[in-house]
C-alpha cells in the first residue's frame, strides 16, 4: 500500500479541486436523471392533454436539465483534467528528482524498467485520479440524492436502487477484483519482459539482424504473451459490463413493477409511472465505473510500487539537503575497500592514496576491478566495507551532483547527444567559440570540424553515430579540455586511436592535467613512463603500487 499512500500524498494540496470535480460529476449525472425523468413526465402529461402552462413548465425543466448537464459535464472535465495534469506534472518532477542521484550506477541494467516507468507507468497513474478517486465520491453523492427521492415516491424502487449500487459498487468489484489483480500483475511482468527484450533488440540491432534471429523470436513471443494477458483483462472488463447491464435491466424492470403497484394502490400518480424506472436506471450511471475503478486501482498500485522500487535504491549522499562538502585538497584515499556486484566479489580490501597533483596509471586485465574502483569513486556504487575520502571529505557524505562539480571524467563509452557539436561542447561548460575551437585543436579534431560545411553547427546524430569511434573519443576529450576541475579520471580514452593521433593528443592531455590529480586507466604500456606511479589490479586486489621502473623490472623477472 506504500504506492497508494504516495499517490494520495500528491493530491492533498488539490483536495478542494478533487472534491469540486466529484460534486460537478454528481451534478452532471443528476441532470441526466432529471432530463430523462422530466422528458418521461412531459410525454405522459401530453397524452392526457393538460393545460398548456403545465407542459411549458416541463419543457422548461427539460431545457434546464439539458443545458446544465452540458455545463456541469464541461466544467467537471475542465476541473478534473486540470487536477490530473497538475498531479502528473508533480509526479514526473518528483520521479526525475529522485532518479537523478541514482544514475547511472545504482540503476544498473534497469534501463528498460526506467523506460517503462517514464512512458507507461506515469500514464497509467492518470487513471488513478480520473477513475479511482472521483468514482466513489460521485457514486455516494448520487446514491444519497436518488435514494431520498425514490424513497419519497416509491420506497421499493429505492431499495432496488440501493441493492444495485451495492452489487455494482461492492460485490462485483470484490468478485472480479482478485482476478483483475492477478491479471494486472501478470500483465505487468509480461510488460517488463517485453520492454527489456525490446530494449536489448534495439541496442544490439546489428547483431540481431546478422546471425541472432532467435532474439527476434523472443521479442515476438514476449509481445504475444503480453497481448494474451491484456486480452484477459479486457475480457474481464467485458464480463463486468455484462453484469452491469443485467443489473441495470433488473432495476429497470423491478422499479417499473414497483411503480405500477404504487399506481394501482393509489400512492403514485400515473403520470410518474414511466419516470420512476427511467430515473432509477439512469442513476446507475454513477456506479458503473466502480468495478473498473478497482482494476485501475490495482494497476496504479503496481505502477507506483514499480517506480518506488527504483527510487528507493540506496545511494550515497542522495538526500536533497546534503550539505556542500568542504574540499581540502588532500587527494584520494581508499582504506580497506571491498565491493561485490550481485553477490560476486569485485574488490577485496583495496587500499591506496593518490596525492593532490599526482599522476597515476592503473593497469589490470578485464574484470580485475579497475572500472569498479572508478565507479566507486564517482559515487555510482557504495562500498560494502572500508572508507573512501576525496579531498578530505567522506564520499558517503557527498551526492553525485556534488562529485560532478569536483571531478572531470571521460569513460570508454563516450556520451554524446543528438545536437550540434557546439551544443555538445556547451553541455559541459559555457565556453566561447574560441575556447571551443582551442579544445577541439587539443583533441586533434579541429581540422575535421573546419572541413564540415556547418562547422560547429554540424548536427550529431543520437550517441554521435555519424562520427567514428576515434572521433567520438576526441569529442569527449574536447569536452574535458573545457572543464576546470581539480580531479581527472580517464578510462582508456586513447585506446583505439592511431599512433599519430595518440602522439598529438597525449602531450596536450598531460599539459591539461599538470596542476590536477589524474587517475588514468590504460592497457597501453608505452605511456607508463609519463606517470608518477603505477597501480596494478588483479582479481579485485592491488598486486603492485609503485613507480614505473620497479614495475618494469618486476615484469622482466
Image (cartoon, rainbow, N blue to C red):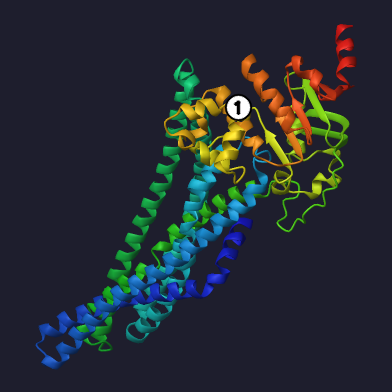
Label 1 packing within 10 angstroms: few (<14), some (14-19), many (20+) = many
Q: Depth check: 12 or 447 in front?
A: 447
Residue 31 figure quarter:
bottom left
Q: Secondary structure at mark 1?
A: helix
x%, y% of residue 359?
A: 81, 29
Say left or right for 492 vs 37.
right
Which quadrant, please, contains the N terminus? bottom right
Among all residues in the image, which is located at the extreme top? 557
Question: Does any portion of residue 497 appear in the rendered image?
Answer: no
Residue 537, relative to residue 193: is it above or below?
A: above
**Which residue shows up at 43% across the image and 47% down it?**
233
Say left or right for 386 vs 129.
right
Among all residues in the image, which is located at the extreme left? 49
Q: Depth check: 505 or 111 in front?
A: 505
x%, y% of residue 105?
A: 68, 38
**Which residue shows up at 74% across the image and 44% down it?**
406
**Which residue shows up at 80% across the image and 46% down it?**
396
Question: Does any portion of residue 191 appear in the rendered image?
Answer: yes
Which residue matches tag 1?
473
Q: Depth check: 264 or 72 in front?
A: 72
Amino acid at each position: 500500500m506504500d504506492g497508494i499512500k504516495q499517490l494520495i500524498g500528491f493530491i492533498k494540496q488539490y483536495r478542494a479541486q478533487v472534491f469540486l470535480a466529484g460534486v460537478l460529476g454528481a451534478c452532471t449525472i443528476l441532470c441526466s436523471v432529471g432530463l430523462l425523468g422530466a422528458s418521461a413526465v412531459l410525454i405522459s402529461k401530453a397524452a392526457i392533454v393538460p393545460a398548456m402552462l403545465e407542459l411549458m413548465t416541463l419543457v422548461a425543466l427539460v431545457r434546464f436539465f439539458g443545458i446544465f448537464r452540458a455545463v456541469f459535464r464541461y466544467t467537471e472535465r475542465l476541473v478534473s483534467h486540470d487536477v490530473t495534469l497538475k498531479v502528473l506534472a508533480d509526479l514526473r518532477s518528483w520521479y526525475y528528482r529522485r532518479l537523478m542521484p541514482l544514475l547511472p550506477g545504482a540503476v544498473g541494467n534497469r534501463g528498460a524498467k526506467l523506460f517503462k516507468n517514464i512512458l507507461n507507468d506515469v500514464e497509467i497513474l492518470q487513471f488513478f485520479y480520473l477513475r479511482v478517486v472521483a468514482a466513489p465520491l460521485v457514486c455516494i453523492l448520487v446514491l444519497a440524492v436518488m435514494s431520498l427521492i425514490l424513497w419519497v415516491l416509491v420506497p421499493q424502487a429505492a431499495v432496488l436502487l440501493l441493492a444495485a449500487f451495492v452489487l455494482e459498487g461492492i460485490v462485483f468489484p470484490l468478485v472480479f477484483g482478485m482476478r483483475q489483480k492477478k491479471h494486472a500483475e501478470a500483465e505487468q511482468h509480461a510488460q517488463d519482459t517485453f520492454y527489456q527484450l525490446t530494449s536489448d533488440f534495439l541496442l544490439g540491432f546489428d547483431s540481431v539482424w546478422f546471425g541472432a534471429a532467435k532474439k527476434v523470436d523472443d521479442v515476438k513471443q514476449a509481445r504475444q504473451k503480453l497481448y494474451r494477458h491484456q486480452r484477459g483483462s479486457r475480457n474481464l472488463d467485458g464480463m463486468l459490463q455484462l453484469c452491469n447491464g443485467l443489473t441495470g435491466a433488473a432495476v429497470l424492470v423491478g422499479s417499473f413493477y414497483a411503480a405500477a403497484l404504487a399506481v394501482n394502490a393509489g400512492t403514485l400518480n400515473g403520470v410518474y409511472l414511466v419516470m420512476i424506472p427511467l430515473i432509477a436506471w439512469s442513476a446507475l450511471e454513477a456506479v458503473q465505473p466502480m468495478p473498473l475503478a478497482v482494476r485501475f486501482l490495482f494497476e496504479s498500485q503496481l505502477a507506483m510500487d514499480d517506480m518506488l522500487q527504483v527510487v528507493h535504491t540506496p545511494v550515497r549522499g542522495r538526500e536533497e539537503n546534503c550539505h556542500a562538502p568542504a574540499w581540502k585538497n588532500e587527494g584520494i584515499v581508499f582504506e580497506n575497500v571491498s565491493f561485490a556486484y550481485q553477490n560476486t566479489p569485485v574488490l577485496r580490501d583495496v587500499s591506496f592514496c593518490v596525492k593532490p597533483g599526482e599522476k597515476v596509471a592503473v593497469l589490470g586485465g578485464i574484470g580485475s576491478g579497475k572500472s569498479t574502483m572508478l565507479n566507486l569513486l564517482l559515487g555510482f556504487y557504495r562500498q560494502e566495507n572500508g572508507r573512501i575520502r576525496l579531498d578530505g571529505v567522506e564520499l558517503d557524505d557527498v551526492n553525485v551532483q556534488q562529485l560532478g562539480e569536483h571531478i572531470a571524467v571521460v569513460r570508454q563509452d563516450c556520451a554524446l547527444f543528438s545536437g550540434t557539436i557546439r551544443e555538445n561542447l556547451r553541455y559541459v561548460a559555457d565556453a566561447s567559440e574560441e575556447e571551443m575551437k582551442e579544445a577541439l585543436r587539443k583533441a586533434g579534431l579541429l581540422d575535421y570540424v573546419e572541413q564540415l560545411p556547418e562547422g560547429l553547427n554540424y548536427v550529431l546524430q543520437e550517441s554521435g553515430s555519424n562520427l567514428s569511434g576515434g572521433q567520438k573519443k576526441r569529442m569527449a576529450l574536447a569536452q574535458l579540455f573545457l572543464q576546470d576541475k581539480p580531479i581527472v579520471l580517464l578510462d582508456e580514452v586513447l585506446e583505439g586511436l592511431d599512433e599519430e593521433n595518440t602522439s598529438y593528443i597525449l602531450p596536450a592531455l598531460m599539459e591539461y592535467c599538470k596542476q590536477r590529480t589524474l587517475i588514468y586507466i590504460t592497457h597501453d604500456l608505452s605511456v607508463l613512463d609519463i606517470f608518477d606511479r603505477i597501480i596494478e589490479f588483479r582479481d579485485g586486489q592491488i598486486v603492485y603500487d609503485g613507480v614505473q621502473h620497479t614495475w618494469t623490472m618486476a615484469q622482466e623477472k
